[in-house]
Image (cartoon, rainbow, N blue to C red):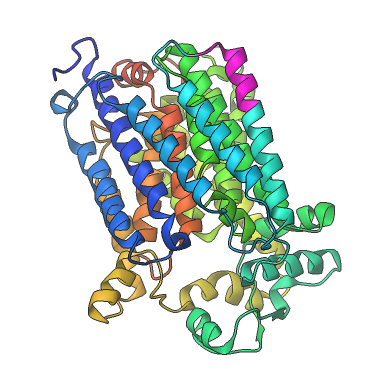
Amino acid sequence: MMPNASLSPPAQAICDLRRRVTVALSLLLLMLYPHSGALGLGSAPLFLACVYAFFRMGSTLRIQPASSLGFSQDALGERPLLRTLVIVLAVLQVLRLPGDALHAETSRLPHSLLAIWLAGVGLWATRRERAASPAASRALAAVCVLSAGTVFAYLLLHAPSPRIDVFELQQRGAALVWSGQNPYSALYPNPYDPVETTAFFGHYSATLDHYPYPPLSLLLTALAHRLTHDVRWLFLLSHLLIGWALHRLSQRVQKAQPSSFDRGLVLLCIHLLHPRGFLVIEQAWTEPLVAGAISLWALFRAQLSQRLEPEAPRLASRVWVVADSLLLGLAIACKQYGLLLLVPFLFPSLFAWTSPAWLSAQRRRAFLLALLPLVVSYLAFAVVQPADFVEDVLLFQIKQPFRSDALSLPALFYAVSDVKLPGAVAAIGILLPLSLVWRKRPPGLPAGLPGQLVLASLLLFGFFATAKQAFCNYYYLVGVLLLLTLAQLDEAADAEASDTPSRRPPLAS
């Protein structure tokens, strides 16, 4: 198979990256199906394959574009890969109900029909003919989102009380906010028996004395609880919002570069067919909130370069740049590990290619603005009872014991050796992908937002894969980042960004 001579070297590198991202996404989704995302005989081989796929994706960033595979979009096999993934995910959804806390009488029919419908739409979107008109694509996307929302709402009503501390903590924490009490100083019911409590928290206690979620997450779930009496409706809304953002981002790319199939529609279907997507919502894990905030920021960033034309007023430019940093800051403030999204701001060589060229002079200002939501929300609760706040939000995560059932390399190493690796091993998972881009942008990494999403995917996956605790909710976020990457990868735009210097003047400091 010969390389496509019509593609420039940067475009060839992006084609290769797109294929590797698709493979990594496929393995990531499949590994979460067995054991509900915990370590087991079914998930361990898929997990190791996924680690290898991410390692390959990261290592090929250093390859010079001229030596990459450089196959055209159809020759890459992206379309067959996506078609196969849609079919497999639909079959897995039909084989079992997606939740662990559903009533026994819950009908399987709505969920099975949804899976078949999404599979049909996904296969139609990846046919060889020219992609559907934008209007038809938007209409189908709306029907898919509404269908998934209706079925997930039905399932959520049939799982009112999942047996997990996450749900109990957030429900009671939200109620405490509206009663004027401090959730970080309260006691919570313990849904686990003594053996489970000792395994999960390191010691037994009849009650739980921690609320480990950041203030912004607390305030948003409190609002959802006030409106619906169940914080999980917020996570369902975020899940659907991610799908909508994926479609919108892909449509913006395809408007500039027509594709042979409707990538946005098929990525939306893959997201809604996530094998553990509903489980994450049912158990009240907060990753959909983080992923939703990142999706909104990605959509805003994609519009930013079009809004800020060279002749735009300088004041208007500042307003949009501030809004961009603050929106990223919301994603960072939703979860403690969100600070990893700030890595590009720390190094001028990284920030130069993860942001428009005319923003490079604003690195320190953008860094501080992105930290602002976190600092303000943390201080608002820390000043009341600082000891309780620091213990719950910061120290609790560090003190969490090693989990032998975690879907991570330390847990897998423990299974074969009975040796518990220290928690500091997770630093390796962060430093390894960071070393790929430490000094300058690798030639195989796209410019702008796609490059930042690839880097975030590698950093977060590396951190989770080497952590003492990692389950399907963490990898749910990585999956969303990979989907956003596929929605944004554009050979023509990247080639232009790589070869053409920006003509926009830097903003005044």
User: Of helix, strand and loop, which mostly describes the magenta segment?
Assistant: helix
Q: Nearer the viewer, residue 368 or 187?
A: 187
Q: Nearer the viewer, residue 315 or 146?
A: 146
Say which residue appears at 38% left-offset and 64% top-offset: 407
Horizontal relation, residue 49 to residue 122: left or right: left
Q: Nearer the viewer, residue 101 or 289?
A: 101
Magenta region: which residues? 132-142
| Residue 169 higher or lower than 351, as above or below | below
Rendering coords of residue 357 (x, y %): 41, 26
Residue 138 falls inside the magenta stretch = yes
Say which residue appears at 58% left-offset and 30% top-offset: 300
Q: Taking the image as drawn, is residue 371 in sight?
A: no
Rendering coords of residue 289 (x, y %): 61, 50
Q: Taking the image as drawn, is residue 414 in sight?
A: yes
Say which residue appears at 36% left-offset and 29% top-offset: 447
Disc tally is 0
Q: Quadrant of the N terminus?
A: top left
| Residue 64 higher or lower than 462, as above or below | above
Residue 340 falls inside the magenta stretch = no
| Residue 480 higher or lower than 258, as above or below | below
| Residue 448 higher or lower than 213, as above or below | above
Horizontal relation, residue 28 to residue 68: left or right: right
Rendering coords of residue 365 (x, y %): 52, 41
Answer with the quarter of the image where residue 377 lies: bottom right
Horizontal relation, residue 503 to residue 329: left or right: left
